[in-house]
Image: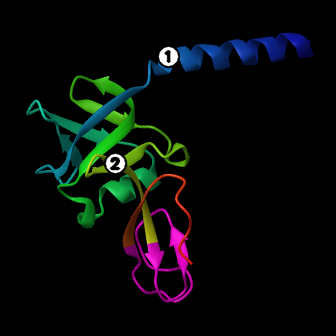
Amino acid sequence: MHRTILLAGLLLAGLSCLAEGPKSTVRGKLTETAGKKPALATAEGKIVFLDGDAETLSVLDDKRLSGMDLELTGQFTAASRFTVGPFYLRSLLVLKNGKKYEVTYWCNVCSIRTYTPGKCRCCQQETELDLREPDAEPKP
């Protein structure tokens, strides 16, 4: 009985991975549509509407990133709709001067780094956008 349940669970997990579809990458300038939804304007002139988890959407809604070139990893759910991969996988990168940067936020008062925009959890001052090369050394 337990083996049957375990095998059924493994089968369902495997099928759900197949149903997700292949991972894709999309690049473009972050823009905002009339409905205030984040989107990418691709080099081909297409608008790709973006979706993702709450943390990813909070970064995409950060006005300081508006107009920046982004590279997003995830999957297309329709020809003009893209769901960004989970936040914890660092599926969102900024492209600048031929390099890729992670989006982070830094509090100059408390020296606390976060990965979503907002107020510092310690002093409540607004955090600053701090683009970092992946695997870069932390600020002193």
**Left or right placement of residue 71 versus residue 15 in this view:** left
The amino acid marked with disc number 1 is: Ala
User: Which residue is disc 2 drawn over?
Assistant: 99
Query: Does residue 124 show up magenta in the picture?
Result: yes
Query: As rendered, which of 24 and 32 lies closer to the eye?
Result: 24
**Residue 135 screen position, x and y as percent:** 54, 53
Q: Is residue 136 above or below residue 18?
A: below
Residue drawn at (49%, 16%) of the image: 19
> Which amino acid, by three-letter code, is at mark 2?
Lys
Q: Secondary structure at mark 2?
A: strand
Residue 17 left/right relative to 77: right
Q: Nearer the viewer, mark 1 or mark 2?
A: 2
Disc with the residue nearer the chain's start (1 vs 2): 1
Which stretch did the figure color magenta? Answer: 106-128
Residue that appears at 44% across and 19% down: 22
Q: Is residue 25 magenta?
A: no
31 or 20, which is in the foreground? 31
Q: Are marks 1 and 2 in contact (CB under 8 Å)?
A: no
